[in-house]
Amino acid sequence: SQKIEQNSEALNIQEGKTATLTCNYTNYSPAYLQWYRQDPGRGPVFLLLIRENEKEKRKERLKVTFDTTLKQSLFHITASQPADSATYLCALGGQSGGYNKLIFGAGTRLAVHP
Amino acid sequence: DAGVIQSPRHEVTEMGQEVTLRCKPISGHNSLFWYRQTMMRGLELLIYFNNNVPIDDSGMPEDRFSAKMPNASFSTLKIQPSEPRDSAVYFCASSQEDSHYGYTFGSGTRLTVV
């Protein structure tokens, strides 16, 4: 069955450093991949989408890579700030059951320390 | 735009009682999703509506769960009878057409069944 793996342990980094989060998947060939941010007590917020034919996508301090050979996506936050502390979810999308279905990973909690 | 609106924010009910969760999607979005989030299982898709029609309800746990979308601006998720294992945060999300555009999530309903 399809499986998405994100680091279950929290990632702790110092302010100003680059945070790198990993999303690995198996038994799946997604057409695209999305990243979401979730703060405590809130719903996930969409950040970026990257398609299978794209290697890299950038948005401000965010960068996402997508390696369909390794079946992996990396999510980078450069010049991290304490306000970036949150849980980050990856989600894989593709045709399933006649529509573009999105499957979420469990998320990785990021803590940026001053 | 007020975003996706869910009510209530919190619900505490006794086992065996009926629970109804409500959702108002973003105007113009024709796809609506109900998700359940727990620590153990993460975000699970329960049901997907497109243009008010249920397309995929394979994630609905059992007959105790039912969902309706009588019009483009309102959806309900009902649990009858509720059980302690139904305790979770239930999210409603909407999107344009399908997940290529990213989902907009509501703030969720935290359900506790005692």
Image: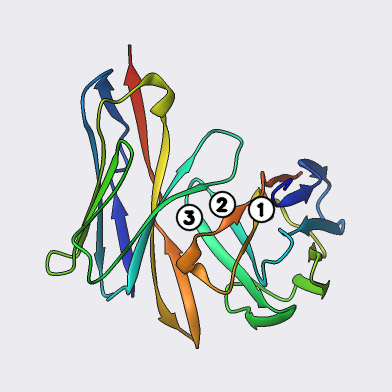
| Residue placed most toward the observer, A80 or B6 | A80
Residue located farthest toward the bottom when viewing the structure as drawn: A98
Amino acid of disc 1? Tyr
Chain containing the residue with disc 2: B
Identify residue for label 2: B37
Sequence-first disc among 2 and 1: 2
Question: Given contact means CB atoms under 8 Å apart, are the residues at marks 2 and 1 in contact?
Answer: yes
Find numbered disc 3 in the image and state the secondary structure of the residue it sits on: loop
Q: Position of residue B45 (x, y in %)?
A: 56, 66
The secondary structure type at the circle numbered 2 is: strand
Alpha carbon distance from label 1 to label 3:
13 Å
Q: Nearer the viewer, residue A78 or A2?
A: A78
Q: Which is more toward the observer, A41 or B81?
A: A41
Disc 1: which residue: B90
**Residue tagged by mark 3?**
B41
Q: How many marks?
A: 3
Which residue does the image show at 76% across and 50% down from the upper left? Answer: B6
Q: Mark 1 Cα within 10 Å, few/some/many (few <14, many 20+)?
A: many
- Quadrant of the rendered image containing residue B80: bottom right
Position in image of residue B102 (x %, y %): 50, 60
Q: Position of residue A72 (x, y in %)?
A: 20, 59
**What amino acid type should be assigned to the residue bearing mark 3?**
Arg
- The way the protein has been coloured in the rendering is rainbow
Query: Depth-wise, is mark 1 or mark 3 nearer the camera?
Result: 1
Q: Quadrant of the C terminus of chain B?
A: top right
Q: In this view of the protein, which residue sits in the foreground, B14 or A21? A: A21
